[in-house]
Structures are given as C-alpha cells and as structure tokens.
Image (tube, rainbow, N blue to C red):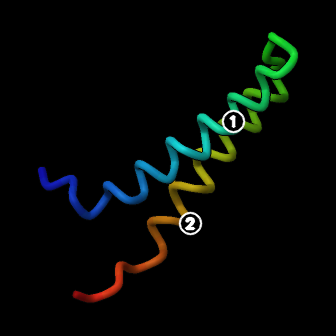
Amino acid sequence: MNWKPYAKAVVGGLVAGLTAFGTALADDRVTNAEWVGVGLATLAALGLVYAVPNKPA
C-alpha cells in the first residue's frame, strides 16, 4: 500500500492530537471531556488536511 498520499494528513492529525493532549495534561490529569477533545482535534485535522490538495510540482 502506498502511504505517500496520506502522509500529510497523518502527520497533521498526530500534531493536532498531541498538541491537544499536551494541553489536557497541564493539570497532570486527563478527564473524559479532554479525551473527547483530543479525539476530535485529531479527526478534524486528519479530515481537513486530507481535503486540501497538494500543490502541483
């Protein structure tokens, strides 16, 4: 399977999810609502970054 078309979206999702997770850890615990926020940030970034086409070479 060729991952190249999905790499940009995967990296964007990871960055958004890890950023939300880092913010949720500010008080040294992660609540259920914060987990939902992490998941939504990850999925939103995956979808939005995937929807933006790459610039042609």
Q: What is the x, y in percent for residue 8?
A: 38, 59
Q: Residue at x 32, y 54 (%)?
A: 7
User: What SS does tag 1 mark?
Assistant: helix
Q: Which mark is residue 38?
A: 1
Amino acid under disc 1 = Val
Q: Residue at x 62, y 55 (%)?
A: 44
Residue 8 located left or right of residue 42: left
Classify 10 Å Cα crowding around label 1: few (below 14), some (14-19), many (20 and above): many
- The residue singled out by tag 2 in the image is 48
Residue 13 located left or right of residue 3: right
Q: Residue at x 84, y 28 (%)?
A: 33
Mark 2 and mark 1: span between their CA atoms? 15 Å
Position of residue 31 relative to residue 8, above or below, is: above
Residue 16 located left or right of residue 51: right
User: What SS does tag 2 mark?
Assistant: helix
> Is mark 2 in CB contact (under 8 Å) with mark 1?
no
Quadrant for residue 50, please give it: bottom left
Residue at the far left in the pictured view: 1
Classify 10 Å Cα crowding around label 2: few (below 14), some (14-19), many (20 and above): few
Residue at the far top in the pictured view: 28
Q: What is the x, y in percent for residue 25?
A: 77, 20
Q: Nearer the viewer, residue 3 or 26?
A: 26
**Earlier residue among tags 2 and 1:** 1
Position of residue 46 relative to residue 26, above or below, is: below
Q: What is the x, y in percent for residue 13?
A: 52, 48
Q: Residue at x 77, y 32 (%)?
A: 23
Q: Which mark is residue 57?
A: none
Q: Nearer the viewer, residue 37 or 15?
A: 15
Amino acid under disc 2 = Leu
